[in-house]
Amino acid sequence: MAGLAESEQDAAEAPPPVPHVLRHRLSTRIWHWSNAIAVFTLLMSGLMIFNAHPRLYWGQYGANWDRAWLLIGSDDTRGYLQIGDRRWDTTGVLGRWEDGQGRIQRRAFPHWATIPSTYNLALARRWHLSFAWLFAFGLLGFMARAFWNGHVRRDLSFTRAEIAPSAIWRDVKDHLKLCFDHGGGYNVLQKASYVGVIFMLLPLMILTGLTMSPGMDAAWPWLLDLFGGRQSARSIHFIAAAALVLFIAVHLLLVVLAGPLRGIAGMITGRVRARG
Amino acid sequence: MSGIVSRRRLLTGAALGAGGLLGGCDRLGESPAFRKILFSADAMNRHAQRLITDRHALAREFETADLSPFFRGNGTQNPQGADYRAHAAENFARWRLEIRGLVARPLSLTMAQIRSMPARAQITRHDCVEGWSAIGKWTGVPLHRLLDLAGLRESARYLVFRCADEMGGGIAYYESIDLIDAFHPQTILAWALNDRILPIRNGAPLRLRVERQLGYKHAKYVQAIDAVASLDGIGLGKGGFWEDRAQYEWYAGI
């Protein structure tokens, strides 16, 4: 990576042999990477916080004697995930797994998925509630900048032509054929997922997170009405986090398929070689 | 060909990087300098919430229909100390609540006196730091009434609650709140839960309700309240049993 960045710098001094195009502005790049750090930290410390009470409920309240719609548990020999009345054996990954020293642990999420890796609710909350600031204000700053500099209008808003069903269908087919050569701008599926994540999923994470705070509930009681209670908000927080993991997985897969070096270098230096 | 190799290299590098990163998080979490940054969020969260919250903003109060069928206990559920057992055996008839420290008139009140004072009843949601919630109806004396009786001195900044339950190492539970929460209308010393005398599981005979914070702030088995100017001399200096031993945040509004 360092070599690539350096050659990019050299290229900046001498006229580049291949034409480069500006792909990502500085504000986008800074936010992308600070947000990547924040999101991974929040996801992994969030899983540790979940481990303290691995049950999810709907409504205002919910504790051990109330009906959980999702729970991760274990019996004498197996770990399991239960959703509604269905139960899946997840021994080795969820509910019952071996830690780095080969000891059996009976927590919900395994050591390789949590921060910290050994059970510590207090420290996980410290990670979560400090990186939440980076996450929330990073997002706010990016949104403000993206509206201000025209990024939203120019790159993320949909044109009438591209939301025609035939155009969307063409884009779906292009994706299935792994054909990612779509000129300079984003295609309609890309726009839809970025807009969905940036303007819906990430704000949803923040608002459901705030609803779990008893202090915020007193300050902004409408949060409880918006999500149908603190335990519903906790459930939605978890579901939205799962959706975010899915987005990240697809995002990384597509970066790899579309040319990872070009993609990553573009998000670091801001420029990519124009395709010949 | 070179493209494939570099992709493979990239993926290997990414995997190694991720592995190193995860181990790094554990080490970072133990580093004093980094902890200072992580732990600074406690004060940030407190200031931010206090900035946007009315001092007297009320926690939501619910209806009887919203009550949890069973209000679970947590932490100590049955104190084992001989003194406490003796009090429990006689239904806390001789239990006393002391209010002392930076007050003009130190008080020592019996449960009969406390129960005869004007009470407040509120159906509120209890949120444990672990993630669960339970809704219960609490009845008790508003703390501000007791503080008015005792006459808080100008220099008092915090109230420290002294509890009868011994935790690990024979240390009795303690917690503290500041005066914003102490004078909040929903902050009460509860002696009843769901219209029955408070069960031992939930902190009999007296427990603190500080409705805008998480469960560990709601001290159970309260025997004394010390008005103090600073938390420095209390326990290990962070204001509460779990704050001192497990690094929980002192401000538990989030």
Image: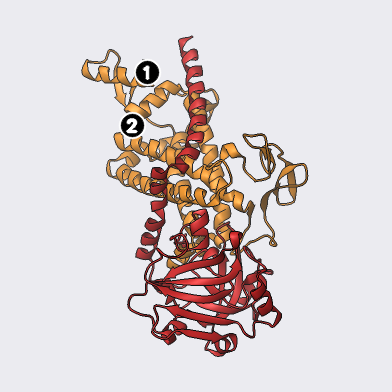
**Residue to which mark 2 is pinned:** A24
Question: Which residue lies at the image location 52% right of the left edge and 26% below the top edge?
Answer: B15
Q: Secondary structure at mark 2?
A: loop
Is residue A179 shown to the viewer in this render?
no
Q: Residues within 10 Å of mark 1 (few under 14, many from 20)?
A: few
Horizontal relation, residue A11 to residue B63: left or right: left
| Chain identifier matching the orange colour in the rendered picture | A
Query: Relative to residue B198, is residue B118 drawn left or right?
Result: left
Check disc 1 and report the residue beneath it: A275
Q: Residue at x 54, y 69 (%)?
A: B218
Seen in the picture, residue A191 relative to B208 is either above or below; the reply is above
Pick the front one: B47 or A234: B47
Instruction: Locate residue B142, reporting x and y percent.
Output: 49, 81
| Residue A4, horizontal then vertical, whole percent | 35, 19
Q: Position of residue B41 (x, y in %)?
A: 40, 53
* Secondary structure under the numbered disc 1 in the rendered image: loop
Residue A50 vertical placement versus B232 (above, below): above
Query: Image point 74% across, 46% down: which residue?
Result: A87
Amino acid at pointer 2: His
Single out the mark in the foreground, 1 or 2: 2
Answer with mark 1 or mark 2, whichever residue precedes in sequence.
2
| Amino acid type, mark 1 | Arg
- Is the same chain shared between marks 1 and 2? yes
- Between B215 and B55, the one nearer to me in the picture: B215
Q: Is residue A105 visible?
A: yes
